[in-house]
Image (cartoon, helix red, strand yellow):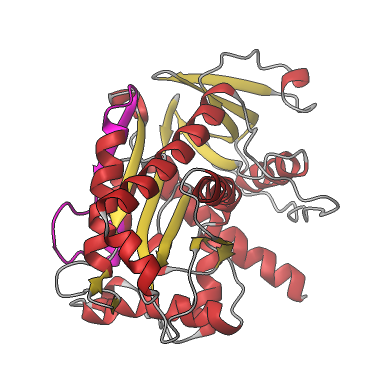
Amino acid sequence: MQTKRKYIIVSIVLTFITSLTCGANLHAQDDKFIVVLDAGHGGKDPGAISNGYKEKEIALDVVLELGKSLEAVDGVKVIYTRKRDKFIELWKRADIANKADADLFISIHCNSVVNSKPYGTETWVLGENNAGRNFEFAKRENEVIFLEDNYEENYAGFDPTSPESEIALTIEQEVYVEQSVGLARKIEDNFISKAKRKSRGLKQHSLLVIRNTYMPSVLVELGFISNKREGAFLNSKAGQNKMATALKEAILSYKKEIDQNVGSNILVSEGEDEETPEAIPLVYENITFKVQIAASSRNLEPKSYNFKGLSELSKEKVGQLYKYYYGNTSDLNEARQLQAEAKQKGYATSFVVAYKDGKRIDISEL
C-alpha cells in the first residue's frame, strides 16, 4: 500500500513538472545553448562573511568572469540572475531560468564554517540525504527566504528548518537529477585538474534555489572563505579566473556531449527496476501523448536499433535540435506506462508531452 501511495504522489508531481516543461518556449528563437548564471546572495543578503571576505562579492565576480568567457563561445547564450549587488528572491532566480527555457542553471556560492581548517570545493545537486552537515548546509542556504517579502505565499508553506520539506523538494526535479550529477562531476573534476583545488566531492541535498528549475541545475561552492588561505585565493583576480575557467570548460564539455550524443549523459542504475503504473484508462479526446526520450543535434532515424530496442518512435526538429519520442496514445496513464518502459531502457530523464491538432500544449491545459 505504501509503495502504491508513493507512486501516486510521484506521478502527480511529475505530471506537474512535465506541464511546466512542455509550456516553456522552445529554442527555435535563437537556437543557442542557454546557460543561466546565478551569483548567490546579493544586496541585503551578504551570504557568508569571514576574514574580511563577502560571499556575495566573490560569487558575483566569478559569475561575471565566467559569463564573459562563455559569451565569447559561438552558439552559447548567457543570462544572469544578477550583474550587480542586488537582492534577488530565490524563486525569481529559478523563474528567470524557466522563462529563458535554459539548458543549464548554475548557482555560485562560497562556503564558511566556524572552524577555519576546512577547505575545498563542493558541487551540489538535488537529493534527499538529510543527515548531519548536509541538512545544516541546506538549511543555511534556504533560510534566505525569510529576507523576502511574502515568502509564505511564494514558497507555499515550505519550511527550511524541516527535513520533511527538504525531502519533498527532491521529487520535483527528479527528471533532471541524472544530468545534474553528470555536470557536477565534470565541474569537480575540472576544479582538481584545471584549477588545482582540493575537491570535497559531489553532494546531494534539497536546495531551494534549484527547487523549481526545470533543467539540469547545480549549486557550486567555490571554497571556504573562513579558511584564510583559500579565502585569499578566491578573493584574488587570479583565483577567480582559475575557477571561472574550470567552470567554463566543464560547461562546454557537457554541451559537447549533448550536441554529439543522444542520452550519453544519462546515468543508469544497475539492477533497479521501475515500477509500472497501474493501467487505469485516462483518455483525452483529440489529444495525443508521447514520451520525449532524447534531444540532440544529430539527425537519427527513428528506428529501434538507434534507441535501445524501443519501437513506435518519431522525431521533431525544433531549431537545430531533433527531439525524439516514444509511443503515441490518447490515454495519459498509458503514456505513463510508456515512460516507465523508456526509463527501464535507460532513458532516465524521459517525460510525457501532449499535442492537440498537431501542436504541443501544456498538460495543465487539459
Q: Is 83 in the magenta?
A: yes
Q: Is 196 in the magenta?
A: no
Q: Is residue 156 left or right of residue 71?
A: right
Q: Is residue 171 above or below residue 102?
A: below
Q: Is residue 104 left or right of residue 59?
A: right
Residue 365 in view = no
In the rendered image, residue 309, in percent from the top left (x then y), is placed at 80, 26
Q: Which residues are magenta?
A: 70-93
Q: Quadrant of the N terminus?
A: bottom right
In the rendered image, residue 211, in percent from the top left (x then y), is placed at 43, 63
In the rendered image, residue 216, in percent from the top left (x then y), is placed at 48, 47
Q: Residue furthest front?
A: 229
Residue occupying image coordinates x 58% and y 51%:
181
Q: Nearer the viewer, residue 340 or 134?
A: 134
Residue occupying image coordinates x 28% and y 71%:
154
Residue occupying image coordinates x 44% and y 43%:
246
Q: Is residue 271 left or right of residue 6?
A: right
Q: Nearer the viewer, residue 68 or 86?
A: 68
Q: Is residue 321 above or below residue 341?
A: above
Q: Is residue 300 above or below residue 350?
A: above
In the rendered image, residue 271, in percent from the top left (x then y), is placed at 86, 52
Residue 88 in view = yes
Tell me where residue 312 sits by quadrant: top right
- Give the number of callouts: 0
Tell me where residue 290 sits by quadrant: top right
Tell me where residue 65 sits by quadrant: top left
Q: Residue furthest right?
A: 271
Q: Is residue 341 left or right of residue 40?
A: right
Residue occupying image coordinates x 57% and y 56%:
174
